[in-house]
Image: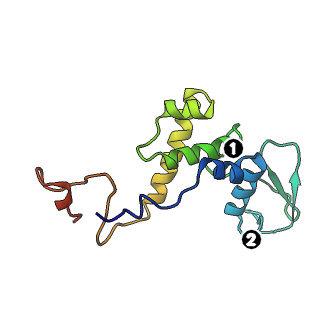
Amino acid sequence: MAMNRVQFQAGLSLPAFYRQFGSEEQCSQALERARWPQGFRCPHCQGDAHYVVQGRTHKLFQCAACRRQTSLIAGTLFQGTHLSLTVWFLAIYLISEAKTGLSALALKRQLGVSYPTAWLIQHKLMQAMARRDDGYLLDGIVQIDDACLGGEPGLPHSDVIAR
């Protein structure tokens, strides 16, 4: 039997995750790079000169040209949150690493938040992943790991072919 390359691909270990995203500053920098790969641009005037307003939970940019303020989390699934980005990033890691899914109760325990907060985080992340997946159309031969999708009743799993 051939080894499943997808199943054994390198992932991000928990210690490696914490080295990369263990502090609020690291998470903030990662989000800023993801939002503005070439640096901050004002969403109103497209200016790149800006100030960072101090004393906020999440980074707040003020455009030097038009003086509009833009939060780092504005327009993202983190918008309006009072949670630290480290909690959100850990939730993303835990949900994406859980092959069989992760319940809101398990997420509550792992993150140390209330059940309603864990439920909201889980649903926001699942909704974002579903929206992202909407842009993909499967084509050709489709291999599914540890799952059976469709097919004729009574046929062995190896005889099931994606149509």
Disc 1: which residue: 86
Q: Residue at x 51, y 49 (%)?
A: 96
Indicate left or right for 98 with 139 as reference: right
On the image, numbered disc 2 is attached to which residue? 38
Colour logic: rainbow
Are there few (<14), some (14-19), or many (20+) residues within 10 Å of tag 2?
A: few
Residue 37: image x %, image y %? 71, 68
Q: Is residue 49 left or right of residue 104?
A: right
Q: State the quadrant of the N terminus.
A: bottom left
**Amino acid bearing label 1:** Thr
Residue 22, how many percent across, how many down? 72, 47
Identify the image quadrant of residue 29.
Answer: bottom right
* Residue 74 in the image: above or below residue 139: above
Residue mark closest to the camera, 1 vs 2: 1
Is residue 9 toward the left or the right of residue 82 in the image? Answer: left
- Residue nearer the viewer, 19 or 108: 19
**Could you give the CA–CA distance between mark 1 and mark 2, rounded to whole angstroms?**
23 Å
Residue at 86% x, 58% y is: 67
Marks 1 & 2, CB-CB < 8 Å contact: no
**Which picture quadrant has residue 145?**
bottom left
Q: Is residue 145 above or below residue 24?
A: below
Q: Is mark 1 on a helix, strand or loop?
A: helix
Residue 130 in picture, x, y percent from top left: 45, 53
Seen in the image, is 27 located left or right of residue 109? right
Tell which circle, 1 or 2, labels the residue nearer the N-terminal end.
2
